[in-house]
Image: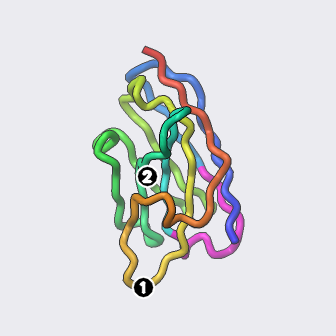
Amino acid sequence: QVQLVESGGGLVQAGGSLRLSCAASGRTFSLYAMAWFRQVSGKERTFVAALNPSGDSTYYGDSVKGRFTISRDDAKNTVYLQMNSLKPDDTAVYYCAARPWKYGYSLSYYSHEYDYWGQGTRVTVSS
């Protein structure tokens, strides 16, 4: 089992940057695909980015391509989301998620395919 704790959220002006972190417990972090989702109050959780266990394959939602970067540091059991050129539409609660990786899997943008979730960190982008 994996426990996830996000940090790094806050208030930033449009055009600014933030880096979110997600610290994972457990010794098998390197066996999990990791992802970030976000949710605006009253709306469904939406996919932001995903990263495979080896860190050499990524997948981004259309609205963040070219602005956000997902990465991982297995030595620190941490996944990051670097967010640049932030827009007011990026305002949301950001959640980290983990999916045990199996042979034949591909990166997924479906939230139901991720087994473990953090508590979320709020990002507010002012105009």
Image quadrant holding the N terminus, namely bottom right
Per the rendered image, the range of residues in magenta is 22-32
Q: Quadrant of residue 24?
A: bottom right
Whether residue 48 sits left or right of residue 73 in the image: it is left
Looking at the picture, does residue 105 appear above or below residue 6?
A: below
Total count of labels: 2
Name the residue nearer the viewer: 48 or 68: 48
At which x and y percent is residue 85? 36, 29
The residue sitting at 56% across, 37% down in the picture is: 93
Label placed on residue 70: 2
Instruction: Give the residue type that dot 1 points to.
Output: Tyr
Whether residue 121 sits left or right of residue 126 in the image: it is right
Q: Residue furthest bottom?
A: 103
Label placed on residue 103: 1
Q: Residue furthest front?
A: 42
Cα gap from disc 2 to disc 1, whole angstroms: 22 Å
At which x and y percent is residue 86? 40, 29
